[in-house]
Amino acid sequence: MAGPERIDPTERAHLRDVAGYSPPIYRYTPGPDLEHLVRRYWIPVWSLPAGTSTVQRVLQYPVCLLVVSDDYSIMVGVGTGLGRQELSGAGWALGVMLQPAAGALLLRAPVSTLTDRSIPLPEVPGLDGTTLTERVRVAMREAPTAESAHRTAIAAVEDALRAIGPVDGEGALVNAIVSFVEDRSEVQRVSQICTAFGIGERALQRLTARRIGLSPKWLIQRRRLHEAAERLRAGAAVDLAAAAAELGYADQAHFTRDFRTVTGVTPGAFLAERRE
């Protein structure tokens, strides 16, 4: 069976810190038999000078995460705002970006119970989090930058996830809905999702609450902000009014409000950060 492949995608959701710093991040695809449960793995490894730190910022995806580091292991629910992680000293983490279907299978409960919060991995009902944490730490302890260590740690994750069984029909549907919204910029209204999948708006809202923890409208808003961050990060001159229109906003003011609410800065300020 083919294993995970090393990838180096442009991560449009990763905003980095205000100075534009990011630690080295090693990324891998899941094994083919787990693509319905896992989007990808990422492994940052950092070593910062004494007395310094960095706050990495990420626009959340509509999925749960599993994270194991040398001093904590958690399952993270979907966040409505901006994800922030302060790094200092030397360390590593193995992150697992799950597919939308996986959260409820691991929690054995609606994912809305984990929105904007996290729980220790050993408390996840559908996972042997204690054994998984120990296996990952043993694999990463000696050489956290080595690909062989990464593959051993990822194998531990995949062994644990295979135990939760196949994705159910509702899970397959929510995977397809999220992919549909993320891959099509022309999707600007919840009614377009309903038409594409033959589902009523209230049924769609209940589905995304159970399996994602947030609303269909949030899916569209977050895709817009991912696209916006990608454009602004490019560093070239950006016509913010034109960008707002292309992203489906009624005007620049609505775009600025959404971007500032989630990221804490206006599009103009974010663009200035990139130029600096």
Image: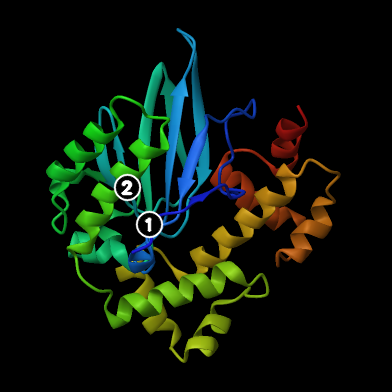
Horizontal arrangement in the rendering, residue 71 relative to residue 2 (left or right): left
Mark 2 burial class by Cα count in 10 Å: few <14, some 14-19, many 20+: many
N-terminal-most mark, 1 or 2: 1
Q: Nearer the viewer, residue 267 or 57?
A: 57
Q: What is the x, y in percent for residue 78?
A: 38, 54
Residue visible at 30% across and 32% down in the picture: 140
Residue visible at 75% across and 40% down in the picture: 268
Quadrant in the rendering for residue 149: top left
| Whether residue 213 is situated above or below residue 151 in the rendered picture | below
Residue visible at 37% across and 24% down in the picture: 91
Residue visible at 69% across and 38% down in the picture: 270
Q: Nearer the viewer, residue 201 or 159?
A: 159
Q: Nearer the viewer, residue 267 or 130?
A: 130
Residue position for label 1 = 3
Quadrant where the image shows the C terminus: top right
Q: Are marks 1 and 2 in contact (CB under 8 Å)?
A: yes
Horizontal arrangement in the rendering, residue 156 relative to residue 29 (left or right): left
Tag of residue 275: none
Tag of residue 154: 2
Q: Determine the CA span between mark 1 and mark 2.
A: 9 Å
| Whether residue 68 is situated above or below residue 158 in the rendered picture | above
What is the number of callouts on the image? 2
| Whether residue 43 is situated above or below residue 167 in the rendered picture | above
Quick one: which residue is furthest to the top in this view?
A: 50
Q: Secondary structure at mark 2?
A: helix
Quadrant in the rendering for residue 105: bottom left
Q: Secondary structure at mark 1?
A: loop
Horizontal arrangement in the rendering, residue 230 relative to residue 215 (left or right): right
Q: What is the x, y in percent for residue 180?
A: 54, 75
Quadrant where the image shows the N terminus: bottom left
The three-letter code of the residue at mark 2 reads: Ile
